[in-house]
Amino acid sequence: MSNKEKTPVLLRLKTISKQEMEEETTELTASGVFYLDHKTGSRYLHYEEEQEAGVIRTVLKVTDTEVLLMRSGAVNMRMHFFRERKRSTISVDYGVGKLMMESELLNIEEIYTQDEMFSGKINFQYELLDNGVNIGIFDISMILEEDKE
């Protein structure tokens, strides 16, 4: 048996994006799987979302030094955030070519509880930059609740 205990979760994801003077909030609920790799201490969240363009599979990996967000399917995106060396390159591909931008992790908080049921919260904020110029700040809030169904 592996040392990765997978917990089915119900994810409530809220994204607040602030671009110029505009603020937009999007929310979605998805089923996913959360697990902790006991060997490395890495935390993983896998989930799928249906959008007009098609299904997008997302993997979030959080360690003590970095956050990796990978999306594949209708959108292909790789965002790698570092807690110490803050700025990093991201790539986004909507099927019309790859966009390269920079991102900077502003803050991350994680809370996990395991009473009778597992629950967790992952919140992080990042800034998106194009040639060093701020093009938006994104506030991601993920609430995880063990899915017993």
Image (cartoon, rainbow, N blue to C red):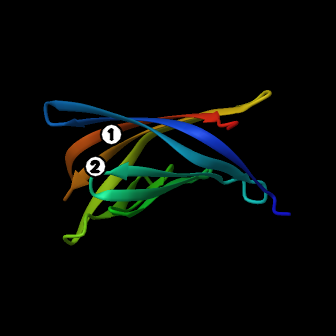
Say if 131 sits above or below 18 in the image: below
Whole-percent x, y for residue 100 in the image: 26, 65
Circle number at residue 138:
1
Residue 37 in sight: yes
Whole-percent x, y for residue 139 in the image: 37, 35
Which amino acid lies under the numbered mark 1 shown in the image of this protein?
A: Phe
Find the distance from the CA under tag 2 to the CA under tag 1: 8 Å
Residue 112 in sight: no
Horizontally, residue 89 falls left or right of residue 65, namely: left
Which amino acid lies under the numbered mark 2 shown in the image of this protein?
A: Leu
Whole-percent x, y for residue 101 in the image: 26, 60
Instruction: Give the residue at x 27% y 57%.
Output: 53
Judged from this view, the residue extending furthest toward the top is 115
- Secondary structure of the residue carrying tag 1 is strand
Disc with the residue nearer the chain's start (2 vs 1): 2
Quadrant of the image containing the N terminus: bottom right
Say if 137 sits above or below 55 in the image: above
Horizontally, residue 145 falls left or right of residue 41, namely: left
Instruction: Give the residue at x 73% y 59%.
Output: 40
Instruction: Give the residue at x 51% y 49%.
Output: 83
Circle number at residue 62:
none
Corner quadrant of residue 147 = top right
Say if 126 sits above or below 40 in the image: above
Query: Dots 2 and 1: beta carbons under 8 Å?
Result: yes
Q: How many numbered markers are drawn?
A: 2
Name the foreground residue: 4 vs 22. 4
Horizontally, residue 21 falls left or right of residue 129, namely: left
Circle number at residue 128:
2
